[in-house]
Image (tube, rainbow, N blue to C red):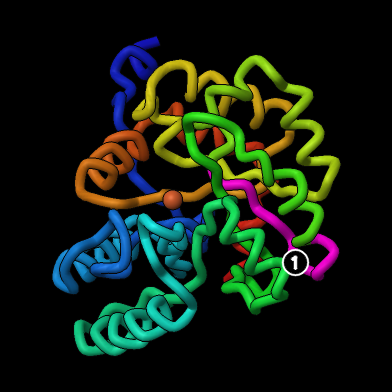
Amino acid sequence: MFKSLFRPARIERDLSFIGADMHSHMLPGLDDGAVTMEESLGFFRLMQDWGYQKCIATPHIFKGVHNNSPETILAVYEKVKAALQEADLRIQLEAAAEYMVDESFMELLQQQQPLLTIGGKYVLIEMSYAAPSPFIESAVFQLNIQGYKPILAHPERYGFYHFNFPQYERLLEMGCVFQVNLLSLSGYYGPEVKKTALKLIRAGKVQLIGTDLHHYNHADAIKQFTVTREFYEITRNMQLLNSSLL
Ligand SMILES: [Fe+2]
């Protein structure tokens, strides 16, 4: 009895069971994530300390907002890789992208432009939080036809789907993989997002977990949440694909 009374509320952080993070904005100066190389290296050091062995950085490709391309991303990736080595950080770095599903993404698909992938086949896609993309189903369909496997980033953050569970099911049936944000589980984006993330996880519909780390507020929230029992209880029974990306 005394043991449970005095059980510490906080436990040791160890994210090594995740292995590879596959969603973050840690390459400097490319989007709304890390700004400087110094900041970027600080994030990589943190992730290494938390237990991650690999970080697959995914800058936004969103025409008119974050005008990235494989060229802009890979150029910065090479610089960061060299800087990691110089700073003696051993965390492995790879670069992919988070594609906004809009007209210009549909053009890339139509022209069969090579896309930046995670693990050679996965393509991370997102939508606006304001309204569902009219192109989402056709993007998922096209990606599959072209031999890619679409990952829908943070499905739990699309409020317009919260009361439309059949739409989640439909995207999964069409061949989408769902990736939940670690931050959503912490309650960082509010109770509704957390509730939906848990509902998706408990229904066995989530195969990937990502930090979606943009800045220090995110890092602080992840730090705090990953020393709680709740985090490990939620993730304990998940069949995660993250470590297959190592
Ligand atoms: Fe993101």
In front: 136, or 222?
136
Q: Quadrant of the C terminus?
A: bottom right
Instruction: Pinpoint residue 120: horizontal percent, then vertical percent.
Output: 67, 75
In magenta stretch: residue 58: no
Instruction: Pinpoint residue 77: horizontal percent, then vertical percent.
Output: 37, 80
Residue name at image x 60 percent, y 62 percent: 243
Instruction: Pinpoint residue 157: horizontal percent, then vertical percent.
Output: 50, 31
In front: 51, or 145?
145
Q: Quadrant of residue 164?
A: top right
Q: Quadrant of residue 236?
A: top right
Instruction: Pinpoint residue 174: horizontal percent, then vertical percent.
Output: 83, 45
In front: 118, or 7?
118
Q: Secondary structure under badge 1?
A: loop
Q: Is residue 107 above or below residue 159?
A: below
Q: Quadrant of residue 38?
A: bottom left
Q: Quadrant of the N terminus?
A: top left
Q: How many marks?
A: 1
* Left or right: residue 174 compared with residue 66: right
Q: Is residue 173 above or below residue 60?
A: above
Mark 1: few/some/many CA within 10 Å (<14, 14-19, 20+) = some
Residue name at image x 36 percent, y 39 percent: 226
* Left or right: residue 73 compared with residue 84: right
Residue name at image x 61 percent, y 71 percent: 117
Tell me the amino acid under the disc marked 1. Answer: Tyr
Q: Is residue 170 above or below residue 4?
A: below
Instruction: Confirm if mark 1 falls within 8 A of ligand 1.
Output: no
* Left or right: residue 52 compared with residue 35: right
> Residues in magenta?
144-153
In magenta stretch: residue 152: yes
Residue name at image x 41 percent, y 69 percent: 68
For label 1, the residue is 148
